[in-house]
Image: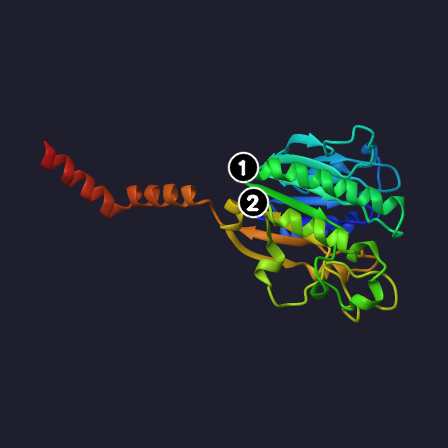
Amino acid sequence: MKIATYNVNGIRSRLPHLLEWLEREAPDIACLQELKATDAGFPIDAIHDAGYGALWAGQSSWNGVAILAKGVDPVESRRGLPGDPKDSQSRYLEAAAHGVLVGCLYLPNGNPWPGPKFDYKLAWFERLIKHAKGLIVSGHPVVLAGDYNVVPTDEDIYDPKHWRRDALLQPESRDAYARLLAQGWTDALRARHPDERIYTFWDYFRQHWPRNRGLRIDHLLLSPDLAARLEDADVDRWVRDQPKASDHAPTWVRLGKAAGRRKATKKAAVAKSPTAAKKSTRARKASG
């Protein structure tokens, strides 16, 4: 199973890129952020034509998240984080699809720092940590995927010294991310590439994309049972190289089958094999 996250930076303007990516990479589940479109403006017909069901929480001009599932309609379990009934920003959507519970999130940027936007970022992060604790305690297979707007360490950015006053690198942001991981989540991309400088975002300034001066801010966190199934994780950099592309590239994980399913599949294969059939026949004759 392949699960991906992609900040599209405007779903209407990037729709051709999104559809090409869905056709070429065919993720089973895709989490989208920064739709920058109202609910009515979400291109559901094009998504259906691409072979995906979808849930979305839009917002005019900014924010907005969506969950796409190949061949099925995701089953919504939550819309918005608990803890602040006055929060009207469309930043969190949760649904079940293909046997996995997926939380799609677009964590606040927090700039300028310091200030009220950074305070909102930290408050939102605390709500996420509290909700995530319940998810991991539940024992369900869960992925928390999205644009976290956090650079976890200095190894996740091309040049940290020029970003020290940015909200993405502040100690409070990094501490919140570390406390989230401490619940038992696995940062899939870093787990697969422990020593590599690997990025998911390149801004539009100073030729940062051609020079590979990027940041790693898009993360897929896996619950323990899914972490045990992790086979691969990477970034679809070719999408960022498209004309007028989003400043993010899709980031993904590939999971193997659950242990129970592998055992069941193996038993079924053995039962269907000619050798097994002969043994079964001999056993019935002997018992008769």
* Gap between marks 2 and 1 measured at Cα: 8 Å
Identify the residue at horizontal 41%, vertical 45% (top origin). 262
Residue 253 placed where, x, y %? Answer: 59, 52
Q: Is residue 52 visible?
A: no
Q: Is residue 88 above or below residue 279?
A: above
Give 261 or 42, whichever is nearer the viewer. Answer: 261
Mark 1 crowd level (few <14, some 14–19, many ≥20, 10 Å Cα): some
Identify the residue at horizontal 85%, vertical 68% (top origin). 207
Q: Which residue is mark 2?
A: 223
Q: Tell me where residue 263 sits by quadrant.
A: top left
| In the image: residue 52, left or right of residue 63 | left
Q: Secondary structure at mark 2?
A: loop
Mark 2 touching mark 1, by CB under 8 A? yes
Quarter of the image containing the C terminus?
A: top left
Q: Is residue 92 above or below residue 245?
A: above
The tag on residue 140 is 1
Give 244 or 215, whichever is nearer the viewer. Answer: 215
Kind of residue indicated by mark 1: His
**Comes first in the chain, label 2 or label 1:** 1
Residue 158 placed where, x, y %? Answer: 76, 68
